[in-house]
Amino acid sequence: MALDLSGPYRAAFNKALPHAKQVTDQFHMVKLANKALDEVRRRVQIDTLGHRGRKDDPLYRARKLLLSASERITANGQVRLRGLLEAGDPHGEVRNAWHAKEKLRSIYDITNPKVGAETVDQLAADLQEPWLPEEVNRLGRTLWRWRTEISNWHKPRVTNAATEAAITCSASEGASGFTNFNNYRTRALLYASKPNWTLLDTLTPP
């Protein structure tokens, strides 16, 4: 059973389906690592230059490369990224956060479930080292809390990405033309709940 990083969902599944194996979705884990990395980049940007990113600032120029998968960065891109980090990351905090993100991504390349579980445990501990940025420490603590569900991925290798994409796309198409966020949200909730409109006339308002 694939799920995102939701404590209430996990508690509900534990109660309703205690024997089901829960799997933390890979997409949400990588998204969390990217979020931690971007938070470090933004903080270091302000700490070093005293303002939010501007188009000529090294870390602002590096933001897309940092969030890219390392294997998709070209040789020229790698050289550019190193140069931008040398110019804008004086204490190596962004570099360390980038390595943390890539290490987390690498656990999904492991094919052996036992090795995968051991790697998750070790990575969760490593990311909580006090010399790393607090944002990375927080990521490590999350990995530790969810280590069982993350490790479970290495057996079924399931994801709920297709389901979420289908729901999001269908709801978006159904809400096409809405310019008000509250109306859009209402339409999405109605779509997801699929109410029986034939019962509408039978309802009596309180």
Image (spheres, helix red, strand yellow):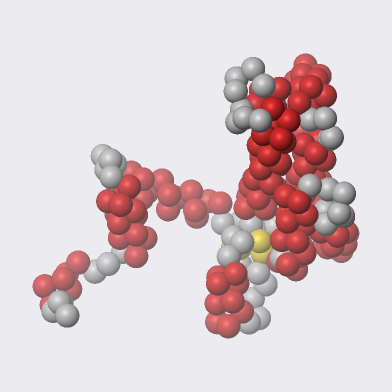
> Residue at position x 79%, y 30% from top?
89
| Residue 15 position within the rendered picture, expressed as x and y whole percent measured from the top left | 58, 83
Query: If the image is split into quadrants, where does the N terminus sit?
Result: bottom right
> Residue at position x 77%, y 19% from top?
80
| Residue 140 position within the rendered picture, expressed as x and y whole percent measured from the top left | 77, 57
Q: Left or right of 117: which side holds 143? A: left
Front position in the image: 98 or 75: 98
| Residue 34 position within the rendered picture, expressed as x and y whole percent measured from the top left | 67, 43
Most extreme residue toward the left, as rendered?
201
Q: Left or right of 128: which side holds 42? A: left
> Residue at position x 59%, y 76% from top?
11
Q: Left or right of 156: which side holds 170? A: left
Query: If the image is split into quadrants, where does the C terminus sit?
Result: bottom left
> Residue at position x 28%, y 45% from top?
180
Q: Left or right of 81: which side holds 125? A: right
* Residue 83 showing in the rendered view: yes
